[in-house]
């Protein structure tokens, strides 16, 4: 075999191997996040989320909302990253870990369920409804409005339909037992802050008993899809909905 023929033969074999190996490749499945710019937060008690239709035609299943509650001794009329250190130092630590993934183009297909739950976050629920069905493709092109008004239960509205927000159904014995997002002694009691009772609550370091007056909840949202090859969930990158102040017991 002369050198020129050998060179052509090697090039041909290389091309065939590339083509054969490429035939079995599948497009890596993706679902798209809600851009952070689509979320408007107001004061410490309201957020509006515009849901785009980017996930139409993908393997999208539903949106998931992760939350964590923080004890505080500080009343903040407006919550933003500037006020997080005053609210609770753990809130800052959590947000600093999550923030690099917001609107990221490199954090694709990270298992954000494991990421959030590993940090002590829980899945948001809504009273009397399956939240996965409520936050399905039916919300594409809609607006989600989260309201934490004073002296009444926090809600999420989609159009004219209003849903009462509920703490995670995975909590076995939460206090208060209503699971509502309300600020009261049972929620703030350090004796209740453990994985069995209030595993969704984080205490404030070095806080005196008389100073534990307020509670805040950080909400993040991700899109969830299904990998058709493995039938496992895939996740978009997260977006921060808001850090809400919980209303007092009414």
Image: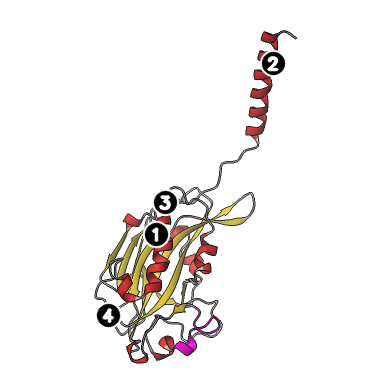
Q: Mark 1 points at which residue?
A: 99
Residue density around tag 4, few if under 14, some if 14–19, many if 20 or more, within 10 Å: some
- Who's the residue at 32% across and 76% down the image? 87
In this picture, residue 164 sits left or right of residue 75: right
Q: Which element type, helix, strand or loop, lies under badge 4?
A: loop
Residue 234 image point, x, y percent:
55, 55
- Who's the residue at 52% across and 68% down the image? 117
Q: Name the residue under label 4.
A: 75
Please state the total of marks drawn on the protein image.
4
Question: Could you tell me if the residues under marks 2 and 1 are in contact, i.e. CB atoms within 8 Å?
Answer: no
- The residue sitting at the front extreme is 206
- The residue sitting at the right extreme is 1
Q: Mark 3 points at which residue?
A: 104
What range is drawn magenta here?
190-199
Comparing 49 with 161, the one in front is 49
Prevalent SS, magenta region: loop
Q: Is residue 162 visible?
A: no
Residue density around tag 1, few if under 14, some if 14–19, many if 20 or more, within 10 Å: few
Residue 82 picture quarter: bottom left
Rendered position, 11 above or below 169: above
Query: Upstream in the sequence, badge 2 or badge 1?
Result: 2
Residue density around tag 2, few if under 14, some if 14–19, many if 20 or more, within 10 Å: few
- Who's the residue at 29% across and 67% down the image? 80
Q: Name the residue under label 2.
A: 9
Residue 213 image point, x, y percent:
33, 86
Viewport quadrant of the N terminus? top right
Query: Upstream in the sequence, badge 3 or badge 4?
Result: 4
- Colour pattern of the rendering: secondary structure
Rounded to the nearest whole Å, what is the CA distance between mark 2 and mark 1? 52 Å
Query: Upstream in the sequence, badge 2 or badge 4?
Result: 2
Q: Which element type, helix, strand or loop, lies under badge 1?
A: helix
Per the rendering, the mark at residue 89 is none
């Amino acid at each position: 075999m002369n050198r020129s023929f050998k060179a052509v033969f090697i090039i041909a074999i290389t091309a065939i191997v590339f083509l054969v190996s490429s035939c079995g490749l599948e497009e890596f499945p993706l679902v798209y996040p809600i851009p952070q710019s689509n979320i408007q937060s107001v004061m410490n008690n309201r957020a509006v989320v515009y849901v785009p239709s980017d996930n139409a035609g993908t393997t999208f299943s539903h949106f998931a909302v992760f939350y964590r509650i923080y004890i505080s001794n500080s009343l903040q009329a407006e919550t933003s990253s500037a006020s997080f250190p005053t609210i609770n130092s753990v809130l800052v630590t959590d947000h600093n870990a999550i923030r690099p993934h917001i609107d990221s183009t490199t954090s694709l297909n990270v298992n954000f369920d494991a990421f959030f739950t590993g940090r002590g976050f829980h899945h948001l629920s809504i009273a009397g409804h399956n939240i996965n069905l409520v936050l399905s493709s039916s919300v594409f092109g809609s607006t989600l409005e989260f309201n934490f008004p004073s002296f009444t239960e926090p809600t999420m509205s989609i159009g004219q339909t209003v849903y009462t927000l509920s703490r995670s159904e995975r909590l076995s014995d939460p206090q208060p037992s209503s699971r509502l997002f309300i600020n009261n002694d049972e929620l703030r009691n350090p004796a209740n802050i453990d994985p069995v009772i209030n595993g969704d609550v984080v205490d404030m370091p070095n806080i005196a008993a008389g100073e534990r007056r307020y509670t805040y909840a950080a909400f993040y949202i991700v899109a969830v899809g299904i990998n058709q090859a493995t039938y496992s969930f895939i996740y978009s990158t997260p977006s921060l909905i808001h850090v809400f102040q919980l209303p007092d017991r009414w």
